[in-house]
Amino acid sequence: MARKGDQDRFSTATRLRLLGEQTAARVYRSQSRRQDRRSRLTGRAAFLTLVICSLVVALAYPMRQYVSQRADIAEQRRRMDNAEQQVERLRDEKARLQDDRYIERLAREHLHFVLPGETGYTVIDPEAAEHRRTDEGAADRPWYSNVWDGVDNADRK
């Protein structure tokens, strides 16, 4: 004969109740494990984030200085290249100035230099000639007087 406790043990309602309790216990244990795992990962993640942020902050200023100095170095190299090119141009000019024919050509171009026996011609710009005609008696005065008048006129403007 079966006892009353045995019947309860094998009844459907009892089995369902036990099954529900066991399932609830498993779910509770699983959730608590996940929460434990999450809390451990969150702490680790927070520490890792703190370390990374500290490294970024610690390296930000030196990196900014490094980039700034690299830009300064590039600017100084560009200036140095320009200075070297200018020095090379000046050396070439110095070498040309050692040549008498080059000096003579410069004198002819800029100073209207003519050798004895040569005839020099000066071409006058028509606009400049018109301006010269409007000056009262400019052709009748000595050249230095015209120069001083030009300086005075430029000073007035």
Image: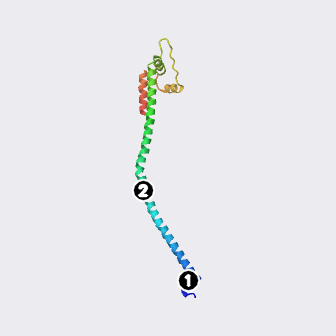
Front: mark 1 or 2: 1
Looking at the picture, tell me which residue is in the foreground, 16 or 81.
16
Amino acid type of the residue tagged 1 in the rendering: Arg
User: Counting residues from the N terminus, which is met first, the one under dot 1 or under dot 2?
Assistant: 1
Q: Position of residue 75 (x, y in %)?
A: 44, 38
> Relative to the observer, which residue lies in front, 24 or 113?
24
Task: Residue 24 in the image: state x and y as whole percent.
Answer: 53, 75
Q: Indicate whether 3 appears above or below 63.
A: below
Residue located at (55% from left, 77% from top): 20
Question: Residue 65 has which mark?
Answer: none
Q: Secondary structure at mark 1?
A: helix
Q: Quadrant of the N terminus?
A: bottom right
State which quadrant residue 2 falls in.
bottom right
| Disc number placed over residue 51 in the picture, else none | 2
**Mark 1 crowdedness (10 Å alpha carbons): few <14, some 14-19, many ≥20:** few
- x and y, in percent, of residue 83 in the image: 43, 32
- Look at label 2 and name its amino acid: Val
Badge 2: residue crowd in 10 Å (few <14, some 14–19, many ≥20)? few
Secondary structure type for disc 2:
helix
Q: Which mark is residue 9?
A: 1
- Check if mark 1's residue and mark 2's residue have beta carbons within 8 Å: no
Q: Classify the position of the C terminus by image quarter.
A: top left
Question: 104 or 122, which is in the foreground?
Answer: 104
Q: Residue furthest top?
A: 117
Between the residue at mark 1 and the residue at mark 2, the CA separation in whole angstroms equals 58 Å
Res 140 seen here: no
Is residue 25 in sight in this rendering? Answer: yes
Q: Image point 41% across, 29% down: which residue?
A: 152
Identity of the residue furthest to the front in this view: 1
> Is 30 rendered above or below residue 151?
below
Q: Is residue 135 above or below residue 47?
A: above
Q: Position of residue 140 (x, y in %)?
A: 45, 21
